[in-house]
Amino acid sequence: MTYEQLHVWLMAFVRSGGLLVLSPVFSGKMIPVPLRIAIAAFLAYVVSGLARAVVPLPGDVVGLIFSAAHELLIGLMMGLGMRLVFFAIEFAGQVISTEIGLVMSAQIDPISQSNSTPIGSAFFYFGSLLFLVSGAHHAMLAAFLRSFELAPPGAISATRNIGELFVHSTGNIFLSAIQMAAPIMAINFTVTLTFAILGKAAPGINVFSESFAVRIFAGLTLLGLTLGLTAQLVLSQLRQSPELMLRLIP
């Protein structure tokens, strides 16, 4: 292996490492760190046989660190582009849990090691299943390989303006989450309005406590009925994510 090939492998290893840090499923606690390092090394080995450095190799340690930092930034931005869908899924789970009254049953998510509601955890696992079943992980790796055609190792472009795209993409998190949670928000409004009218008609009934069971039952029932629509929305977002990954390359 020549010095140029070694340099390309090292830059590809750093970029793939940044991708796996934020990419869905691969960044989870169920994937051991040594396995993630092995996957990154294998991806770098594949890339080293295809890509070539387009700029003179760095002659000192400072230049090498600067190049590695740029490659790490590329990998992180690509991983973030794929992870935005899961941010929307998790936020939708939190909104739904709040609407139907299950926010008090928060628990530790074994994957993210953070507090999560049952609906939020279920949505995350559902999104992970769709990510694997739909082949989105294959599309993510294909986009990663194509990124070396758009941004070869060592090439730094100052003409890319990703600020507006990044703001627009992160704003879509809230739009997608509200679209997933909209039916539950509507049924919660209907149940609240119904019990408010009932409370005025029959003041002796404790409508506040009685509404909890109805809100949970109606919310979970509607959630099951609209799960197919949620899956279609998630799949649509997953199909667009590989292109977003490439557009977010700095």
Image (cartoon, rainbow, N blue to C red):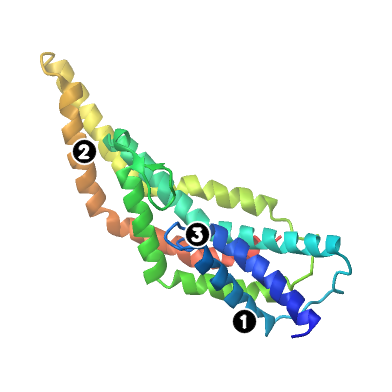
Residue 101 at x, y = what percent?
27, 34
- Residue lying at 36% horizontally and 46% vertically, measured from the top left: 93
- Residue lying at 43% horizontally and 43% vertically, measured from the top left: 114
Please, what is the three-letter code of the amino acid marked with disc 2?
Ile
Find out whether the residues at labels 3 and 1 contact each other: C-beta distance under 8 Å.
no
Nearer-N-terminus badge (1/2): 1
Nearer-N-terminus badge (3/2): 3
Left or right, residue 152 beside residue 123:
right
The crowd level at tag 3 (other Cα within 10 Å; few <14, some 14-19, many 20+) is: some
**Snapshot quadrant of residue 195:** top left
Task: Tell me the quadrant of the picture where the N terminus can be found.
Answer: bottom right
Q: Which residue is mark 1?
A: 46
Residue 65 at x, y = what percent?
79, 61
Left or right, residue 244 beside residue 86:
right
- Residue lying at 24% horizontally and 29% vertically, measured from the top left: 192
Q: Which residue is mark 2?
A: 216
Q: Which residue is mark 3?
A: 27
Residue 168 at x, y = what percent?
59, 50
